[in-house]
Image: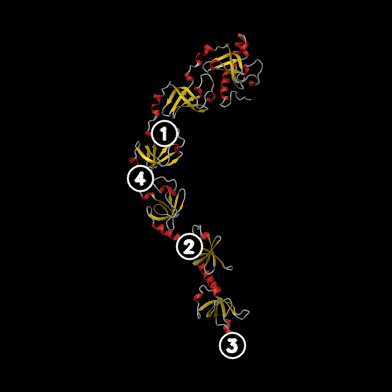
Amino acid sequence: MKDISALLDASLRNFKEGSIIKGNIIGIHPKEIVVDIGYKSEGVIGLEEFEEPETLKVGDEVEVLLERLENDDGAVVLSRQKAAQKQNWEKIVKIFNEGGTITGRVRKIVKGGLMINVGVEAFMPASQIDIIPPKNLKEFEDKTIECKIVKLIEDRKNLVLSRREIIEAERAEKRAKLLGSIDKGSIVKGVVKNITDFGAFIDLDGLDGLLHVTDMSWSRLSHPSEMLKLGQEINVMVLEIDREKERVSLGLKQQTENPWEKIAEKYPVGSRIKGKITTLVPYGAFVELEQGIEGLIHVSEISWTKRIAKPSEVLEVGQQVEVSVTEVNPEEQKLSLSLRALEENPWDTIQEKYPIGTKVKGIVRNLTAYGAFVELQEGIDGMIHVSDLSWTRKINHPSEILKKNEEIEAQVLGIDKQNQRISLGIKQLGDDPWNNIDNRYKVGDLVTGTVSKVASFGAFIQLAEEIDGLVHISQISEERVAKVKDVLKVGQEVKSRVVKVDKVERRIGLSIKAADYTPEQLAAETASLESLRGNDMLGSMGDAFSKAEEEFRPGQGSEVKETK
């Protein structure tokens, strides 16, 4: 009796709550099974704790977790699911410590990643699913994937997984193998992984190589997407290898013959060829002569005479054109083409058409501060400098006597064929009145004129034949004049005497206050004017004229800005 009691006590001591023990199925019911663990009572486990309950049969051995030896009803409390979790967790901790991998099934998609069953619930962030995070996580739903445990929290039984680390390790191994096996000039197969403005990155099964846009085709490409698509398989040539930095430069066009090698022989300068316009840019048009060969028609080579702001005004993509080759540069792979070279240059015969001295008619096309451009024929302009508008008037801006789109007559003064310029003049159509100025105006003459401009230092008086004379502020009145505009107004008629005539400088000095002088008084005033220098108001009459030229500017109207 004592032996049986001792044996029973020893048996009881082997059953420790929280431990995993083995038992046998002795009964199967619709919702549960009965398991005998060799204890004085059996345990009951729900069928939902078994992954494949339909395969269970009486007599099968199962491992279970002994939660309690007796509950309130005196029954043993067992769990198959908790036994599996404990076993899996111990296995997981071992894998984590050893740096191994584990396989799990994607149970569901959650915010920011995937929940994966690896025996216990684990989380995989979207950033750790692949090298490039997938856009659609649903493609991984219910899939079984191999992972690496990157974070383990023991007390909370939390796991963070990564598939990316496994992929990166595999790629690193393939990369090292590929770098050791390829050489410059090798042809390798790859997949277009990414396309940028400057080229495409090609996945060489573990190693990314750069295929620059200039190495894709012998012809000009505006963007790599014109030739490649994501996911496309291509064969590329290895151009450069940097094994230390693991960088590879790739080429596509190098696998075909370079059409530029014999370009000078095929398209010599001066030859006429036909081609198709492929691209229009602000500075010209690109013309495809053959596959891989394009030339540029610069906007300046489109026409001899037409003013073309943009090539699209006269050309269009897809248009067939005949051009002349003007320059060949095989080293830089450049061909310069011309449309206008096939036509006669009107500037070659310009001197015969517009001989110097000829009177011509034209339309004022544009006015600038320094002169006017006159269209003589389509694309042929002549320029009238502001100094060639009048013999007598000081013209500060051509708009004083010319209007845009007005038809005028002018004389051809000069031709610069090389720079394609024609100089014109209006004043040359008449005689220069200053040639006979000595006979027209003499010191002491009493003259009548109209105030044409008012300045701080005096006023300009327009005399006959539009000849201007200057009345210095000191010559307006016997009394001191503070401001010229207080005494004289534009358009006012005044009498004055000529006190100075300078034929060389084309200047006439006038005096209003001397209009009633005797000959003796006039002689004294003239001598006084000649003696004036820079410290006395504006200095000499010559200084006054110079000051007028400095102060009067286009757009100021007829009254010169008053100086203080």
Measured in 3D between alpha carbons, the distance from the residue under mark 2 to the one under mark 1, in whole angstroms, is: 65 Å
Of the pair 87 and 10, the residue shown nearer to us: 87
Residue most extreme to the bottom: 1
Could you say whether the residue bearing mark 3 is in a helix, strand or loop?
A: helix
Dividing the picture into quadrants, the one containing residue 535 is top right
Residue 371 on image: x %, y %: 50, 26
Measured in 3D between alpha carbons, the distance from the residue under mark 3 to the one under mark 2, in whole angstroms, is: 58 Å
Residue bearing mark 1: 303
Give the residue type that dot 4 points to.
Pro
Measured in 3D between alpha carbons, the distance from the residue under mark 4 to the one under mark 3, in whole angstroms, is: 103 Å
| 323, above or below 84, in the image | above
Q: Earlier in the sequence, mark 3 or mark 2?
A: 3
Q: Earlier in the sequence, mark 1 or mark 4?
A: 4
Residue bearing mark 4: 259
Depth check, mark 4 against mark 2: the one in front is 4
Measured in 3D between alpha carbons, the distance from the residue under mark 4 to the one under mark 2, in whole angstroms, is: 46 Å
Give the residue type that dot 1 points to.
Ser
Could you say whether the residue bearing mark 1 is in a helix, strand or loop?
A: loop
Image quadrant where one finds the C terminus: top right
| 487, above or below 180, in the image | above
Of the pair 359 and 174, the residue shown nearer to us: 359
Report the side of 256 relative to 46 (left or right).
left
Judge whether residue 163 can be spotted in this image: no
Image quadrant where one finds the N terminus: bottom right
Residue 218 on image: x %, y %: 39, 46
